[in-house]
Image (cartoon, rainbow, N blue to C red):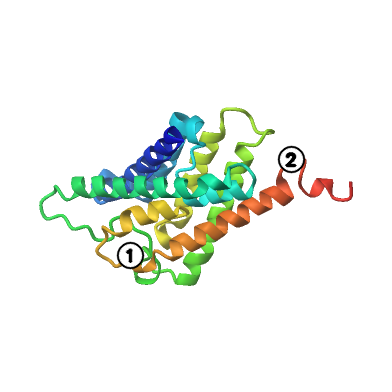
Amino acid sequence: MVRRLSAELIGTFWLVFGGCGSAVLAAAFPELGIGFAGVALAFGLTVLTMAYAVGGISGGHFNPAVTLGLCLAGRHDWKDLPLYWIFQVAGAVLAGVVLYAIASGQEGWSAGGFASNGFGELSPGGYSMQAALIIEIVLTAGFLLVILGSTSKLAPAGFAPIAIGLALTLIHLISIPVTNTSVNPARSTGVAFFAETGATGQLWLFWLAPLVGAAIGALVWKYVLMPGEGLDNLGE
């Protein structure tokens, strides 16, 4: 269990440090040219690389919503969920601390939003709470379907991390303007406390929506799409 929890902490640290770091350190300078697309790719690459590196140890969740979804789909033991969540959040907060220590080393630097998530005034595009809630639920549900499908027995072996990493990239390309993209409560928590925008006051949505979305995605997979268990067996 120590190895598994350590893998989740390290993997979540890498996701937050790499993804949010690209936004805080690189995207802050327009002349570097990475923009939204670069940040989206950075998030996808963090998951892809760590899924290959430590996914074989812990399952490569790096996300409380993913752990919940896998438990609901029968792919993960419920008794491990609390510790997975604790170590995922710890890895995310540790990444926020390290990222803040680096970013604040620049003279005159201000944390601002610090790659945090938000709606209304804290949304990059000024989107409402309703819009944020809907998009986070829908995209997290889709993310779980990709995870469960790409790791199923019918999927080509060895390609799941690529599919999952590309899915997370796509999710960011869609939703950065709306919420700055969460689909991961740990990612949201890890940077919210360092933001100067009051992001912690909206953190509840970025726990609620991804968890609801993960549950929807997992249940759709389990009862509709899962090979040998879905609607194809009705009436047999």
**Residue, x 72% and y 51% (percent of image)?**
223
Q: Find residue 203 and report its image quarter.
A: bottom left
Asked if residue 49 shows in the view, the reply is no
The secondary structure type at the circle numbered 1 is helix
Q: Determine whether 187 is above or below 196 in the image.
A: above
Viewer-closest of 119 and 84: 84
Distance (Cα) linking label 1 and label 2: 41 Å
Which residue bears the numbered disc 1?
Answer: 199
* Label 2 crowd bin: few (<14), some (14–19), many (20+), radius 10 Å: some
Disc 1 marks a residue whose amino acid type is Ala
* Residue 14 image point, x, y percent: 36, 40
**Residue, x 52% and y 40% (percent of image)?**
164
Viewer-closest of 145 and 92: 92
* Residue 97 image point, x, y percent: 25, 49
**Residue, x 46% and y 57% (percent of image)?**
175
Which residue bears the numbered disc 2?
Answer: 227
